Image (spheres, rainbow, N blue to C red):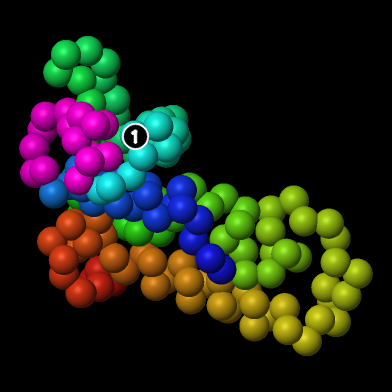
Amino acid sequence: MRISTKGRYALRAMIDIARQDSDQYIRLEDIAMRQNISKKYLEAVIKFLVVNGLLEGKRGKNGGYKLVRDPEEYTAWDIISVTEKDEIAPVACLENGAAPCPIKKTCPTLSMWKEFGQVEKEFFSRYTIRDLAEGKNRTKKK
């Protein structure tokens, strides 16, 4: 699996907002500048996060974006799974809406790929946005 630019930028934006440690809305321009991301591209990424309920947006003079939950309530998996959608499957036959596999019942590797997908999910679920914002190399307690 390869995380797309959209997924990486979404994580960086969420971490940036968490680092502001504020109930105030954070301006898109400020996030883009700090993260060295094109404002136009970041706008599309942020809009996607708002539509999917991960961020709240406000227009106007004091507008911007803020987290809808506390940073420790988001995991990296929450963001990656939303931004990557079907692309997160380790093999094509496990993607949502994949064509039926003619050897599914006898495939010698299917269980391995399913296990790998679960390991990916568990790995990214260990890291909270708070952990990443604080630069901690620790994992979420189970």
Q: Is residue 54 above or below residue 102?
A: above
Q: Does the magenta stretch include residue 108?
A: no
- Residue at the location (34% across, 52% down)? 11
Residue 44 lies left or right of residue 112; in this view the side is: left
Using the rendered view, name the quadrant where residue 112 is placed.
Answer: bottom right
Give residue 124's position: percent from left, percent from top.
38, 66
Number of labels in the image equals: 1
Residue ID at (33%, 44%): 37
The percent coordinates of residue 78 (x first, y second) are 39, 53
Is residue 125 among what the camera can see?
A: yes
Residue that badge 1 annotates: 39
Q: Position of residue 15 (x, y in %)?
A: 23, 51
- What residue is drawn where x is 56% and y is 68%? 1
Q: Which of 65 and 100 is in front in this view?
A: 65
Is 21 magenta? The answer is yes
Q: Is residue 73 visible?
A: no
Question: Farthest residue toward the bottom?
Answer: 108
Residues rendered magenta in the picture: 20-34
